[in-house]
Amino acid sequence: MTTLPLIPLDDVVVFPTMDVTLPVDPGDDERVLLVPRVEGEYAAVGTIARVKRKVRLPGGGTGAMFEGIARGVAGAAQTGPTGDLRVTVEEHPDEVPVDGRTRELTRTLRATIDEILSARGDDGSVQAVLRAIKDPGALADSVGYDPELTVEQKVEILATLDVTERLEKTIELLQERLSDLQLRQKIREGVESGAQKQQREYLLRKQMDSIRHELGDDDASVVEEYREKIEAAGMPEAVREQADKELGRFERMGGEGSGEAQMIRNYLDWLLAVPWGERSEENLDPVHARATLDGDHFGLEDVKDRIVEFLAVKKLRADRGLDDESASDRRRGGGSILTLVGPPGTGKTSIGESVAKATGREFVRIALGGVRDEAEIRGHRRTYIGALPGRLVRALRDAKTMNPVILLDEVDKVGADHRGDPSAALLEVLDPAQNHSFRDHYLDVEIDLSQVLFLATANSLDTIPGPLLDRMEIIPFDGYTVAEKRAIARDHLVPRQRKANGLRDDEVVVPEELLGLIVDEYTREAGVRQLERTVGKLLRKTATSIASGKDEAPVTVDLDRVRDALGRQKVFHESAARTAVPGVATGLAVTGAGGDVLFIEATRVPVPGSKGSLVLTGQLGDVMKESARIALSWVRANAEKVGIDPAKFEDAEFHVHVPAGAIPKDGPSAGITMVTALVSLLTGRPVKHTVGMTGEVTLQGRVLPIGGLKQKSLAAHAAGLTDIVISERNRGDLDDVPQEVKDAVTFHPSMSLDEVLEVALETRVAEVVKAG
């Protein structure tokens, strides 16, 4: 312990080994304690300094040069004989531990200091001085020379007596300092690079302007070019005014350097992309249209008749000048949109192409499946970045005429979310009284769509909003008969697949009877898409055998080749096997893929104490569940009438199941089938395997009409059924059923369930099934 004069230091921290000159007269003392003072508070640790010499300061004052020796911890204070402040001091020279940790920290500190000096652009002189410092504690104290560190940070380093801990704190502070320096350097380099890039772009742009001026392609030339294009575009007067206005804005900007100028150019390009004055010379001859449709499609007589009628009406209206009438007159004139509704693969899209071909118009298809953004129809407003016109404007651009055939495909799959409802935007597009003044949000001018021939397609009407459906005329595509599928395969699918697989017409022959076998045993669909894939697979296998030298052309496809290429039979007529036991009836249904045959199974499970409760399985909808409850109630109420012992409803539970449980099923048309299955179960009389049925049932036993009779009849015919029970009120719908089906199937219109059961159940009395 020793007593030394205390010299307070404001905003300065002196470390051991550091020299400093202070305007202080130390008197006769050879050593002093230099203590930093932060915000009026003395630090606990100071530096013991030796007076090297006294000096005369500028202005005549006296000072001294001090040399830091070691750290000193200040103790009790007292007043000296001359009134100066003195403190007891405990000297703390550095004790350097000889261990790996200290050596590692010393190397890290040296490397960090070198990086900082390099970032500052040191010429090497400071690094040479620091390399001469061998003592770790003194190396850590060298941060006292860094002007970027705060007084508080330096006081913290001075107060750290342990050398290893001091090294750690110094490294932490300097690494923060290094990160800051590196960030500043990166920002500075980025700014310099950006400035250089801007200067380079400026020079290149000036050079480009000079080149364009020499070529006559400067701003004045661009404006003149746009003016000529606008003049030749044949725009309506209002659109022409809008184009001139935007061109004037572009010209006043004096160049293309700004982003807004580029936006104006994009807008003018889109405005010019619309074929304002272009029209296809259309052919509305109904005879030519019918010949074209017959050449491209087999069957679909109702569809072809309606399309020919549509074109004939347009021809008469055009010939008699009625297309210039008012909007209300156009609406009364029957200008509705033809909507082709039917299962997949029935030719809806291809018939649209045939209409374009028959009329001599361009054809454009707009796929609407999954569209949920209204801007897809109306376009984006120009205030948005990356704005584009809607699909209709783009369709006109692609067609290059104002009177194309535009097919709105999958209109039943349009959705809606927070971005708007596209189906609402379609209301204006598809309304003949409004679409002559359709306004796209991007172009923001009126576009006449009244000359466009719109066709729409859908698989189902259920998901089309009512207001949109009101503007449509529905043309059903119910599917093809077996004979029609054979003819389509013979006349269209085989030639198309033969060509697709690199075969000539005389190299492969597919007999028509084998096409019938493929239809019957390998496909079950309303359309012909799966049939075409199957034919393609068969011809692909044949092409492979010819190309590999296994067969020589011509090749006639036989049954063995069919089995070898397509494998075992995929589709079976299960009606006879499924209805061989009581309690199973064959129903008819309509799905998104067309008509289908389904089997309804019923069984009786002994459950003591039960009063004839009902269990339903097969993923049935609410309407179908209600039909099952109605069926069971009617059977219980009329048990004796149909020959059922009422005791069978006691201590029993009835389970009704519709197989294919993974497929949702709903609708009232299975009502009479459920009644038939329950009566068959409880009387022991199997259902005739040739009978299918469809009809809604009431509690009084009346048979109500259903929809989709044509599709159901086609499915029944394809499944080999020869008798179909329907409601008497569906008798008029038989006019829609193809003659081929009516020749092969006997329809049984029925008013009541008594008539249904008389047709459906076997007349023989089978052994009564004992339940329980």
Image (cartoon, grey):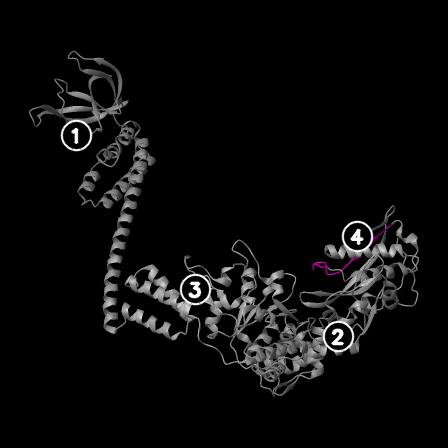
As displayed, is residue 744 above or below residue 440? below
- Kindly identify which residue carries mark 4: 615
Q: Which residue is mark 1?
A: 19
* Comes first in the chain, label 1 or label 4: 1
Mark whose residue sits in front, 1 or 4? 4
* Residue located beneath label 2 in the image: 735
Return the x and y of residue 157 as percentages of the image width and height. 28, 30
Q: Secondary structure at mark 2?
A: helix
Calculate the distance from the C-alpha at mark 2 to the C-alpha at mark 3. Answer: 49 Å
Q: Secondary structure at mark 1?
A: strand
Q: Around disc 1, counting alpha carbons within 10 Å, would you say few (fewer than 14), some (14 to 19), or many (20 or more)?
A: some
Tell me the CA gap for discs 3 and 4.
60 Å
Q: Secondary structure at mark 3?
A: loop
Q: CA distance from mark 1 to mark 3?
A: 78 Å
Q: Is residue 152 above or below residue 442?
A: above
Name which residue type carries label 4.
Val
Residue depicted at 45% across the width and 76% down the height: 278
Q: Quadrant of residue 328?
A: bottom right
Q: Is residue 334 left or right of residue 70?
A: right
State the residue position of label 3. 443
